[in-house]
Amino acid sequence: MRDHTPARIGTLACAFASALALVARRRRRRGRLPAHAVIISPRQSTVVARDGAVRSVQSAELTMAPADLERLWSAASLENLARTYWRFLSRVTLGLIRVVYGEHERSVVLLTRPFTLLRFDAPEYVLEAERGRVRWRIRDGLLVARGGRGCGFLALDVKRPAPGHSDAAKLQIEVEVANFYPAIAVGFSVPVYEATQSSIHVLVTHAFLRSLAKLDLAESKVGRFASAAPPNQFAAPPERLRSPTSQP
């Protein structure tokens, strides 16, 4: 009997993409936003290595008033940006996907904990004068191939380019998934993964990056960096931080 699962997954992906496009159009109609977001991801933003490891890099450039950038350029805002990513993931899936916080982990679940899609270690931070990065190591989950558990990571990276002569300030934001071994590529094939899970990830990530034009960051659940640095910088010299109890 012919297996129609790939076709069904493809149909689901198309429906999800249509829903994302509708949400994006509605948000653009709400009026002028405080920042302008442009996707600058490379043409081949997702690459699958010969051993099955996936690397996906999605990037955007935010243009805003210099005063807004100065207000947001802080370690606390980086922590809030991390929380904003998880909040967006839940909202865009209408609550079907939730993020469950643990003392030493972060779990992305479908409706409830037994259906854990991805499980991450606690976040790691890199704080520099002109760059900030938060990274979660991928531990396991239904979307991770058995042989790839504990190998990959998800990271958010923000960079502040050198100021130009314009009245506007720019900020580069990158979402990276690296050394990730998808279970669907092992169970079906790489083309099926690229047409479904990979495509959905790119669509969701681009929607998230565009949503940042609202400059509406969610408040961290812990607020670890609420008063750790002056309001207009991350940290100098570079500081690498990891805490099992840090929950953005």
Image: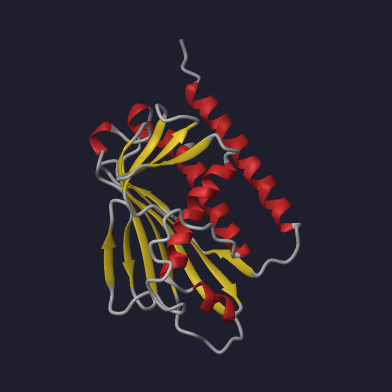
* Residue occupying the point 38% across, 32% down: 184
Residue that appears at 60% across and 38% down:
94
Question: Residue 248: x, y in percent?
Answer: 42, 55
**Residue sticking out furthest to the bottom:** 165
State the image quarter where residue 106 is shown: top left
Residue at the outermost top position: 1
155 shown above or below 108: below
Q: Which one is nearer the viewer's eye here, 5 or 232?
A: 232
Q: How is the structure coloured here?
A: secondary structure
Q: Nearer the viewer, residue 230 or 110?
A: 230
Q: Residue at x 36, y 60 (%)?
A: 134
Location of residue 185 in the rendering, given as x and y in whole percent from the top left corner: 36, 34
Q: Is residue 210 left or right of residue 73?
A: right
Asked if one can make out residue 58 in the rendered structure from this viewpoint, the answer is no
Of residues 235 and 64, the one nearer the viewer is 235
The quarter of the picture where residue 139 lies is: top left
The answer to whether any part of residue 234 appears in the image is yes
Q: Position of residue 15 (x, y in %)?
A: 62, 35
